Amino acid sequence: MLRSRLELAGLALSLLMIAAATLPSGAPSRVHVITLCLVCATNGLASAGLNVALFVPFGFFLQRRWRRTARVVRWGFLLSLAIELLQLTVVQGRETAVGDLVANTAGAALGALLAWRPGAWLLPRGDARRGLGAAAAALSTVVLLATAELLEPSAPPGHYWVQWNPEWRRTGGEGGEVIASDLDGAALVMGRMADPDPFRAAVLAGGVLRVRIIVREPAEDPEPLFRVVTGVLNEGTLAFSLLAHRDALVIEPRFRADDHDLARPPFRLEGALAGTRPGDTLDLRFQRVVGRGESVTVGDRPPALLSNTIGRGWALIYTAPNHLFALRAVVDLLWLGALAGLVGWYARSARATAGALVPLLIAAWWAPRTTDLDATRWREYAALVAGAAAGALLRRAAERLAARLADDARAAQRREGVQTS
């Protein structure tokens, strides 16, 4: 039967997604870490949300096949437990966390609940569709505006610590060796800042951070060179981070997203270390240009201005691996298309789709004019329009598929009636 085949295919796909997200190795490590916190401080909220979302399709399709919610939740727990044990004993560089186990199980339970009456939220009609359409337009607009707000710089009050080459003891010192750092001429020496207020004010106002390094052998994995940590040493969160990776520099300023335990989208300056040799001394200069982004100067080269876009909201909940960094611009467009696709899915007509799309276009135009976001490009506007159109088309295709499944179900019932009589 078509419905059974679709449910089985969905279940298989959800298992593949879970395996792809949880089983690949991370950075090599000899120590397997067990974390007991439910929502850990660094990217904790983003990680918990992703772990819930990852198991929702699994719970949904398993519930559609079994129709037994308690059994689905139990299998969600057992699958998550098996993954955490593999990460503890086999998979390198991954943490085993109690919070992941709880979030995964909650995701399976949520998926099972959504499978009870999928038509009520997936293909609603009448007033329900109108209400969900308004909610989808409002949610997508809020996401765009929140992206701009969360990608503004942040420097919270508290203790601040300066660290040079914090991972050298473990890695042996690749990438570069920091020999001096200062902010607006005031030296930043290793250890706790006596008075962090000038640092906080300078970071937000556009102070000039200088870091001098001696270039070492290229680092195959991102190697921390310099960072400022706020909070308790070794347990705080990053206020600024500079890493070397091959011939690139990875710059991680602090955003307001960090204040809410979300992920931090880094900047990557390709070729920053190209043309240098081990032993060369290199001056690096970083400065926030208010309303435009982060200016980075490497040696005598012209400054490079780095900034995020309105489509970078996905990076607040998911940290892309280094090898996928070049695809971020493509993911930005897909993210914008998905947000607008939600609007197109629930809109009742082409006119309603166009009307619901207007707030998204206004938000994409307005947000960069009041924040450090880069100006929205034409292709990003096009992604919003194309996403809304694709959502409407997919809705029609889903309605035709639902009608076909209903016809198949009625035909099966008739056959069973004939056989019974």
Image (cartoon, helix red, strand yellow):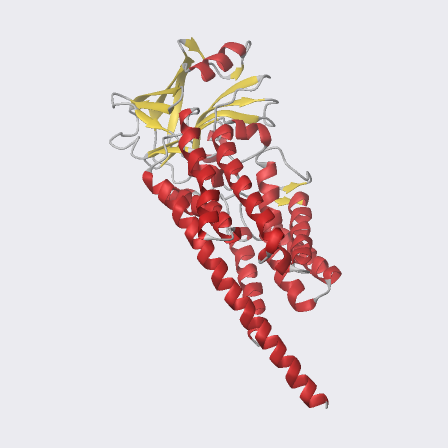
Whether residue 379 is visible to the viewer of this picture, yes or no, is yes
Residue 150 lies, in percent from the top left, at 51, 30
**Which residue lies at the image location 56% right of the left edge and 19% below the top edge?**
156
Q: Nearer the viewer, residue 149 or 299?
A: 149
Number of residue marks: 0
Q: Quadrant of the N terminus?
A: bottom right
Q: Quadrant of the C terminus?
A: bottom right
> Which quarter of the figure has residue 125?
bottom right
Whether residue 95 is visible to the viewer of this picture, yes or no, is no
The image shows residue 98, relative to residue 275, as above or below, that is below
Residue 82 lies, in percent from the top left, at 65, 56
**Which residue lies at the image location 60% right of the left edge and 43% below the top edge?**
49
Residue 116 lies, in percent from the top left, at 68, 60
Relative to residue 372, is residue 38 drawn left or right? Answer: right
Relative to residue 79, is residue 219 drawn left or right? Answer: left
The image shows residue 268, relative to residue 418, as above or below, that is above
Q: Nearer the viewer, residue 254 or 145?
A: 145
Residue 413 lies, in percent from the top left, at 66, 80
> Which quarter of the figure has residue 121?
bottom right
> Which quarter of the figure has residue 375?
top left
**Which residue lies at the image location 65% right of the left edge and 38% below the top edge?**
39
Q: Nearer the viewer, residue 246 or 252?
A: 252
**Which residue lies at the image location 41% right of the left edge and 28% below the top edge?**
368
Relative to residue 407, is residue 391 drawn left or right? Answer: left
The image shows residue 408, relative to residue 343, as above or below, that is below
